[in-house]
Image: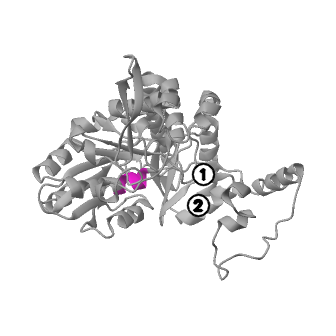
Amino acid sequence: MLEAVGVDAVEDLFDIPSDIRFDDTFGIDARTERETRRLVRSILERNDDLTELLGRGHYGYYVPSLVDHLADRAEFLTSYTQYQPEISQGFLQALFEYQSLLVELTGLEIANCSMYDAATALGEAATLAERVRETSGHRVLVPDLIREGRDGTLANYVAGTDLVVETYPTDDANVDREAITELVDDDVVMLYVENPTVRGTIEEGLEWLGELTAENDALFVLGSDPIALSLLQRPADVGADVVVGDASVLGLPTSYGMGLGLFATRERFLRQVPGRLVGASEDDTGRRAYTLTLQTREQHIRRERATSNICTNQAWVALRTAIHAAVLGPTGMVELARRDVTRAENLAGRVDDLVGTKAPVHDRHHLREFVAHVDQPAAAVADDLEERGFAVHVVGDHEIQVCVAGATDGELDAFVDTLEVVVR
């Protein structure tokens, strides 16, 4: 190959200036495979073996082994991007089913495949709102309890545009109706509401918020996830224009940052959707066929025509989500969501029975997680729990947040017993 291109060595193919060329060694000793495995195992064994009752956007549900067995097939792992539909029909069909799942759950006509995570999906929703707004306006409203990281990503997205991100107050973890009425006017291009909220509460009065945004020609963007959507009101029925969130609650264990961005919207915004859409058509013999129908990202079209610079391929993660959802089926997804409601309610009641604690802090319905008040400093309580094998979030001077998703009944029983000792 080198002879064919007329060079003597691989280094001749690269023009790296000498002042930035790395000429030193990395100091990594050569090891056999057995030695390397032993080293990696010793590093991983240093991790704390904790029962994680953590949530706030990252959830570790049980993933059926069938998901691994199917998703790890070579034809899925090696099909990076499905540019050639004639050789990618199986993968394209799976992605079409993933999109169809989101359409059914949200009630919106268009769902893309796919995005990095919930934070980037939120950023894309804001820039979409700016493009489709028929009148002037530049304000984007988000809750003051917005998840950590999402506000920073949103700020990066709107940098360089005329958009300004502002927060609106919450009342008992839900939207403060009186305050939002004063804030939403014809200068607002987007209102973002989460359901469930970052504190696990179920947002009430979504129809009213949808009407408020429509009256002011703003986009109503709702943040959620497939498990919650299987039980809660369909976003389309409450006036939502865009649904964003993290779909990796299905198909992935807790991934500590990695996710799968959910993005669904109304058909009239079809040409404004970031990323890619898989569509169904027919081949020249009349058989049903699948293809990448719409690709509005700048990787595929001229920069000035692109709606997004998203160049990700989360297709394999979306595949896992679709498989997990298919394994559960509609009844299974609803049952899982209902368990999240009842188990969170039961655990909050047991925590509330302990001396020195009160739960839940918010007088609302909850899904998956809730905030508890502790008389002792919350940081000290969390440290003591960690020493005894449990991880919880500290969300206030005297508040901890507890999530039941993925935890067994036995682990929750042990947590209550341990918390009783810690808060004495």
The structure residue drawn at horizontal position 54% and vertical position 39%, both measured from the top left corner, is 316
Q: Which mark is residue 381?
A: 2
Residue 120 image offset from top left, x and y in percent: 41, 55
Question: What residue span does the magenta drawing correspond to?
Answer: 118-123
Give the image quarter of residue 71: top right
Asked if the residue at tag 2 contacts the one at tag 1, i.e. Cβ–Cβ closer than 8 Å, the answer is yes
Give the image quarter of residue 119: bottom left
Q: Residue 125 carries which label?
A: none
| Marks 1/2: CA–CA distance | 8 Å
What amino acid type is highlighted by mark number 2? Val
Is 122 part of what is drawn in magenta?
yes
Residue 342 image offset from top left, x and y in percent: 45, 34
Residue 311 image offset from top left, x and y in percent: 45, 52
The structure residue drawn at horizontal position 86% and vertical position 52%, both measured from the top left corner, is 38
Q: Can residue 30 be seen in this view?
A: yes
What amino acid type is highlighted by mark number 1? Leu
* Residue highlighted by disc 1: 419
The structure residue drawn at horizontal position 47% and vertical position 40%, both measured from the top left corner, is 344
Q: Can residue 175 be seen in this view?
A: no
